[in-house]
Image (cartoon, rainbow, N blue to C red):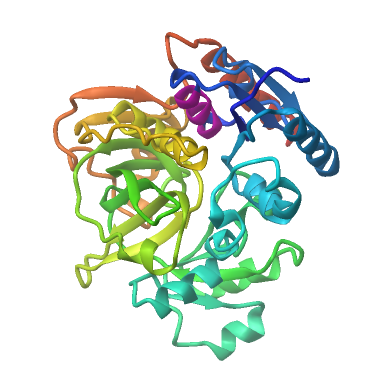
Amino acid sequence: MHAPIDAIVLGLSPTGLYAVRELSRARRRVLGVDDAPACAAHSSAMRAHWRCTDEEQLLQRLVQLGMEQAEPPVLVPTSDKYIEFVCRHAAALQTNFHFPHCYIDGADVLLDKLKFHHLCQRHGVATPGVWEVADRQALAAMAGQIVFPCILKPALIHRARPFLHGEKVLLARTPDELGRLLDSLPNDVGGWLVQEVIPGAESRITLFGAYVDRGGEVRQAFTARKLRQYPPGFGSASLVMSETDTLSRDFLRAIGFRGICGTEFKRDPRDGRLKIIEINPRPTLWFQLCHAAGKRIVEAAFCDLRGLPAPVEHAQRNGVRWRYLLKDLASSLFYRRHGNGFVFPRPDLTAAGARRGRAWAVFDARDPLPALAEPLVYLRKWWGGR
C-alpha cells in the first residue's frame, strides 16, 4: 500500500504551490502532479510528486492510489487543464476521491467564456459585451455592434496558449485590425469571442476568493484589489493588495456553485457599475495573498469534503501586498516604456492604500527551492518555444 495521502494537488505552478503549502501547514499529506517541469515540484511541503504526461496513465495511477487509501484523498485541480481532466473522469474518480460538486456540474460553463456570459445575462449580472465572431464575413454582418477597442479571446483559453505565445487575449483597436486577427486564427481551440474593453486602469479590478461548501455557505471569503498584471492590461495578477470590498454572493448561490472560486470584477467608469470578468472554479494565482491575509480557502475545502470541522474564520488582514516578482518587473517595465500609448492608463499603485505586509507568489524562506527553480522553469519554456 502507498503511504497515506490526504490531498492531491493537480498542477504545480505557483498556484499549485500555494495549495501545497497551505495544506501541508495544516498537517495534510500532499501528493503533487504535473505533466511538465514546475516550481512546486521542488517544494519540501509535498510527500511526493508525479510527473505524468499521459492522461490515461494518470487516471489509472490515481484510481489505483485511491483504492489503496483508507480514506479517499481530496483532489485539488489548480489549472483549467486539470479541471477538464477531473470533469471528464468524474465518474471514475468519485468513488475513491473527494472533490467539489462543481466538477460534476457547472465548471464547464464557467470555463467557456460565451456560456459564462449567457449565464450572467440570465441572472442579471453585469458583464462586458461579448460577441461570437468566426470570420471576416461575420464581422461585416455585425458592423456597428462591436465597440472598439476590443479584445479577441479564445472561448477556452488553455487550449489556445500555443497560438497566443504568452498572451491571454489579442487587442484590436479598429475593425481592420480585428479582421486581420480573425484571418490568422486556428480552428481547433474551441472557438473565439470578441469582448468589450472596460476602460480604466487595471487597478480598478476587484478580486474575490472563497470556498462555497456543500451546504451553499460561503467560507473564508476574501477580497483584494489588483494593482498590476502580466501581460499588461489583459493578464494574470502580478501585484495585488488585500482590501475590504462589498461584493454580492447571491450570484454564486443562484447558480448553485459548490467549490473553490476566484472571481474578477472591474468598475466601469462610464456607468459606475461593477462588471464581472470571470469566475475561476479553482484556486487562482494570487491565493497566496489570501493565506497571508489570514484566510484558508483550500483548507476549508479539504475539511468540508472530508467531513471535518471548518477552519476558524478570521477577519482578513488588509494592506498585505502580494507580488509575482518576475512577471511584475516585466509589467512595470512595459508601462515605463509604452504606458503613454497603451489602451489603458498606468495603474494607480496607491489605490489600495498603505502596505502593512508582504507576500510572494513563489518565495518562502521556509521552502526556498521553488523560488530557485522558477527562473529555470521559465528558461526551459522559453528555450522550448524557440
Q: Nearer the viewer, residue 281 or 368?
A: 281
Left or right, 379 with reference to 89? left
Q: Position of residue 92 (x, y in %)?
A: 76, 49
Q: Position of residue 232 (x, y in %)?
A: 42, 45
Tag count: 0
Q: Position of residue 291 (x, y in %)?
A: 35, 29
The magenta segment is: 15-23
Asked if 291 appears above or below 27 in the picture, the reply is below
At 23% from the left and 68% from the top, the residue drawn is 273
Magenta stretch holds residue 18: yes
Q: Nearer the viewer, residue 74 or 264?
A: 74
Q: Nearer the viewer, residue 300 or 273?
A: 300
Q: Residue furthest left?
A: 354
Residue 198 visible from this viewpoint: no
Q: Position of residue 304 (x, y in %)?
A: 45, 41
Q: Quadrant of residue 224?
A: top left
Residue 376 visible from this viewpoint: yes
Q: Quadrant of residue 123?
A: bottom left
Magenta stretch holds residue 313: no
At 34% from the left and 30% from the top, the residue drawn is 322
At 59% from the left and 27% from the top, the residue drawn is 6
Main SS type for the magenta part?
A: helix
Asked if 333 appears above or below 179 in the picture, the reply is above
Quadrant (top left, top right, bottom left, bottom right) of the N terminus: top right
Asked if 73 appears above or below 84 in the picture, the reply is above
At 70% from the left and 17% from the top, the residue drawn is 3
Quadrant (top left, top right, bottom left, bottom right) of the C terminus: top right
